[in-house]
Image (cartoon, rainbow, N blue to C red):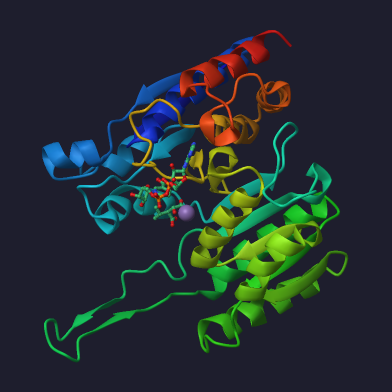
C-alpha cells in the first residue's frame, strides 16, 4: 500500500473546521482505494502568532519541505494585521516551494444553482490559472512623508520573463488537454510597463500553440464577461492579483466561496504542492460550525489527483456531487441547515458506500 506523508496546516477560523472534514473524507477515500495518508499537523496560525510573535517557527518552511503534499486551511484573523499573517505564512510557502501555479477550477456542480439565472453546468466550467509567485504581490516600495499632507505610498510589481512564460505555457498545455481555449487577463490600456510585457510574452507563447485558440481581454471587461457570458470562457490565465480577484468572482457565479478549491502547484515537483480552498478564514462565521466544507474537500481531491491517486480523487468528487444533488444535507450558504460536520460526514459516507 502506498503511504503519503501529508502536512496539515488548519490555520485560522473556519480553516480549522473545513480541514478536519476534508481529512475525514480523504482518509475514507484513501482507505477504499488502497493508499494511506499519514498526517502531521502544524499549528502555524494567528493563534501561534499571538503566543509566540511568529506565524511559524524560523525553520517552519524546512519542516514542511520533505512532505509529499500540504493541505492548508486558511490563514488570517482579526487581531493580527493581514499583511503580517499572510506574508508570515501563506505567501512565503508558495514562493519557497516553487508553487508558481495557482490552479482554481470553477464548475457548477449538480444540485447547486448559479446566481446567474438559467445557467447550467455545461456553461460554467472554467479553469483559472493564476500566477502565484510574483506580479503585484511584492515587497518593493514603501511609505513616504508619513504624517505630512503630501504623504504617499509606492508599490512596485515584478513581472519576469521566465515567470510570465511558465504560467502562460501552463495555461496552454492545460487548454490543449481539454480541447479548450485560453483567455489572458490584461490591462495594457492602463498599466504601461508590466501589462504590455505580459501581453508580448502571451503572444509569443500563443505562437507555440497554433492548435489552441487564444485571446486577450482587459480585466474589467473580462469581469463583466464572466458574469454575462461565462460559457465563452475556458482556461483563463491571469497575473497574481487579477487571478485572485477573478477566482472569487468565478466562485461567486458557481455556488459561492464554499464550493471553490485551489491548488498551489509546483509543476516540476521539486517541492511539495499545497492545496487549499479559495476562501479565507471567514471570521464572520468562525466558531459557528456552519462553514461549507466542500471547497476544502475538493481541494483534497486535487491533492489526491496530484499524488497520482486518480481513483480516490474521483471517488471524492463523485461523493460531493452525489450529496449535493440529493440536497438533503446542505450548509446555510447552500440554503440548508446542516453543520460543517454533518455535510463532511455525509460526503465521507457517500465515499464509502459507492
Ligand atoms: P473569506 O473568504 O474568508 O470570506 C468572505 C465571505 O465568504 C464571508 O462572508 C464568509 O463567511 C464567506 N465564506 C467563505 N468561505 C465560506 C465557506 N466555506 N462556507 C460559507 N461561507 C463562506 O474572505 P475575507 O473575509 O476577505 O477574509 C477573511 C480572512 O481570511 C482575512 O484575514 C484574509 O486575509 C484571509 N484569507 C486567507 C486566505 C488563505 O489563507 N488562503 C484566503 C482568503 C482570505
Ligand atoms: C487567496 C487569498 C490570498 C491571496 C491572500 C489572503 C493573501 O486571497 O489565496 O486567494 O491573495 O493570494
Ligand atoms: Mn483570494
Q: Position of residue 186 (x, y in %)?
A: 62, 76
Rendered residue at 72%/42% (across/down): 108
Q: Quadrant of ligand 2?
A: bottom left
Q: Nearer the viewer, residue 138 or 285?
A: 285
Left or right of 182? Residue 62 is left
Q: How many marks?
A: 0
Left or right of 332? Residue 255 is right
Q: Nearer the viewer, residue 158 or 18?
A: 18
Q: Position of residue 118 (x, y in %)?
A: 80, 48
Q: Nearer the viewer, residue 212 or 262?
A: 262
Residue 113: quarter of image: top right
Q: Position of residue 79 (x, y in %)?
A: 20, 47
Left or right of 84? Residue 192 is right
Q: Nearer the viewer, residue 41 or 282?
A: 282
Residue 70: quarter of image: top left
> Up-down: is 10 above or below 346?
below
> Up-down: is 218 above or below 123?
below
Rendered residue at 83%/46% (across/down): 122
Residue 30 appearing in the image: no
Rendered residue at 67%/14% (across/down): 350
Left or right of 46? Residue 317 is right
Instruction: Pick the quarter of the image with the N terminus.
Output: top right
Residue 190: quarter of image: bottom right
Q: Position of residue 346 (x, y in %)?
A: 59, 15
> Up-down: is 183 above or below 34?
below
> Up-down: is 326 above or below 250?
above
Residue 240 appearing in the image: yes
Instruction: Pick the quarter of the image with the C terminus.
Output: top right
Amino acid at each position: 500500500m502506498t503511504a503519503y506523508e501529508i502536512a496539515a496546516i488548519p490555520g485560522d477560523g473556519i480553516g480549522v473546521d473545513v480541514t478536519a472534514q476534508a481529512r475525514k473524507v480523504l482518509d475514507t477515500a484513501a482507505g477504499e482505494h488502497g493508499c494511506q495518508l499519514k498526517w502531521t499537523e502544524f499549528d502555524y496560525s494567528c493563534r501561534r502568532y499571538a503566543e509566540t510573535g511568529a506565524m511559524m517557527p524560523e525553520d517552519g518552511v524546512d519542516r514542511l519541505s520533505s512532505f509529499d503534499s500540504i493541505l492548508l486551511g486558511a490563514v488570517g484573523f482579526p487581531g493580527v494585521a493581514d499583511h503580517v499573517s499572510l506574508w508570515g505564512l501563506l505567501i512565503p510557502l508558495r514562493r519557497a516551494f516553487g508553487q508558481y501555479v495557482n490552479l482554481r477550477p470553477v464548475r457548477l456542480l449538480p444540485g447547486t444553482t448559479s446566481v446567474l439565472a438559467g445557467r447550467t453546468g455545461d456553461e460554467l466550467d472554467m479553469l483559472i490559472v493564476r500566477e502565484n509567485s510574483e506580479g503585484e504581490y511584492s515587497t518593493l516600495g514603501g511609505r513616504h512623508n508619513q504624517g505630512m499632507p503630501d504623504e504617499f505610498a509606492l508599490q512596485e510589481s515584478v513581472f519576469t520573463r521566465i515567470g510570465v512564460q511558465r504560467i502562460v505555457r501552463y495555461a496552454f498545455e492545460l487548454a490543449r488537454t481539454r480541447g479548450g481555449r485560453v483567455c489572458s487577463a490584461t490591462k495594457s490600456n492602463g498599466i504601461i510597463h508590466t501589462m504590455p510585457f505580459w501581453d508580448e510574452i502571451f503572444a509569443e507563447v500563443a505562437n507555440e500553440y497554433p492548435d489552441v485558440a487564444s485571446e486577450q481581454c482587459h480585466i474589467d471587461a473580462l469581469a463583466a464577461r464572466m458574469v454575462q457570458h461565462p460559457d465563452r470562457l475556458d482556461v483563463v490565465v491571469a497575473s497574481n492579483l487579477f487571478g485572485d480577484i477573478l477566482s472569487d468572482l468565478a466562485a461567486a457565479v458557481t455556488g459561492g466561496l464554499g464550493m471553490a478549491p485551489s491548488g498551489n502547484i509546483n509543476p516540476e515537483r521539486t517541492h511539495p504542492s499545497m492545496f487549499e480552498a479559495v476562501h479565507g478564514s471567514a471570521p464572520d462565521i468562525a466558531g459557528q460550525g456552519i462553514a461549507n466544507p466542500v471547497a476544502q474537500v475538493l481541494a483534497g481531491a486535487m491533492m489526491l489527483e496530484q499524488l497520482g491517486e486518480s481513483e480516490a480523487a474521483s471517488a471524492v468528487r463523485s461523493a460531493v456531487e452525489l450529496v449535493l444533488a440529493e440536497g438533503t444535507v446542505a450548509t446555510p450558504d447552500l440554503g440548508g441547515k446542516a453543520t460543517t460536520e454533518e455535510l463532511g460526514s455525509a460526503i465521507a459516507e457517500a465515499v464509502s458506500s459507492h
